[in-house]
Amino acid sequence: TYTLCIFGTFITRSGVISSVHAFALSNIGPMFAGFLIFIILVSAYLVIKRLPLLKSDQHFESVISRESAFLINNLVFLGACFAVLWGTIFPIVSEAIRGVKVTVGAPFFNSVNVPIGLFLLFLTGVGPLVAWRKTSPRLLKKIFLRPTLISLLGLVIMLIAGMRHFYALVSFTLAIFVTATIVDEFHRGARARMKTNQESYPVALWHLLLKNKRRYGGYIVHFGIVVLFIGFTGQAFGTDSEAKLKFGESMNIRNYTLTYRDLRQLEDPNKIVWKAKMDVYKNGKKIDTIYPNKHFYKVQQQPTTEVVLHSTLLEDLYVVLVQPNEDNSALFKVYLNPLVNWVWIAGLIVTLGTFIILLPEEKGKAPSRKQIAKKRKVSKVMA
């Protein structure tokens, strides 16, 4: 990992790959390359020398086990890493061999990493719930039957609603499946505590979380990953529109209508500012008035665009003043990106789960035989 980080820094900063982050002309390149070769050789030597120590004394008893889930998870991550590495260095390899630099863009990375990401989302729901060493068919049915039926029901509802984007359907279905497995796990644990400790459902749920911080905090982190994927999936429904408008004219993007009202030119010692005024309507109802700007800095002789954002939980509307004209007409570019805020919400959920995991365990005496017996009884009830 460290070697790949250094390699990525080298090809970016050295200018081998065109980047705004490349260093100016300097003699640091050979030293950087030498350091990279040094850590590759040292790392390879240490891995080869210690290879016997990396061999496990244990053997897989079943493909359907938590060990297998972790192994498959790591192999999938390795595949994603290789795909990104190959896509990044392919222009360099192509230019060195054929003398032609072939550009690898977003479509390649999306076509490879989207299926990989969806499979990882599936493992997020399956991996933590299967048993160590071996999982019986009876336990598999008990754990996954209800989440599977719920996710299939969600898929049917989305199809009836008219959704046809393949990857979006898969992503939302898996999100429902993983969420159902997490909720089911919390529910089973709370029900088990209710039977053994005579607690109410909310109290049992709270104590379950406090007594098993790593396990259930981890489930909260996994739910954050689910919400993150929901936010990513919204990109499949993003759209944009461009229009040249005069005062009083409107442009439409889905159920939004934007009406161009005014254009003012302001000036200060540093810059000239064109400030447009637009009314935003959703389903025919006015919801906002926005002011997209375009600045022109006199000293640098450079224009910049001040994007206006109208944000909701379900979607973000971006409005760009591309070009103001002398006749007060203006060219506008509008982007509608669904579920962007879900990415930020996911970050908060992951942070909450991580905080719970890091909470210190309660200090006290070693558990008594009675407490150990009660804990075993709870485990049997949950199983």
Image (cartoon, rainbow, N blue to C red):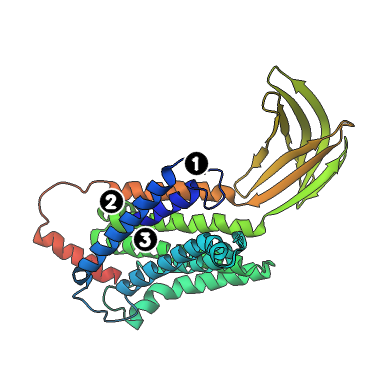
Q: Which mark is residue 23?
A: 1
Amino acid under label 3?
Answer: Phe
289 vs 127: above or below: above
Amino acid under label 2?
Answer: Leu
Can residue 1 be seen in the rendering of this structure? no
Instruction: Calculate the distance from the C-alpha at mark 3 to the C-alpha at mark 1.
Output: 52 Å
Which label lies toward us, 3 or 1? Answer: 1
Q: Which mark is residue 210?
A: 2
Which residue lies at the image location 41% right of the left edge and 66% below the top edge? 78
User: In screen coordinates, is 223 left or right of 296?
Assistant: left
Can residue 215 be seen in the rendering of this structure? yes
Q: Earlier in the sequence, mark 3 or mark 2?
A: 3
Which residue lies at the image location 80% right of the left edge and 26% below the top edge? 264
How far across and how far down the image is residue 173, in percent? Answer: 54, 68
Location of residue 146 (image quadrant): bottom left
Amino acid under label 1?
Answer: Phe
Classify mark 2: residues with Cα within 10 Å, few (<14), some (14-19) or many (20+).
Answer: some
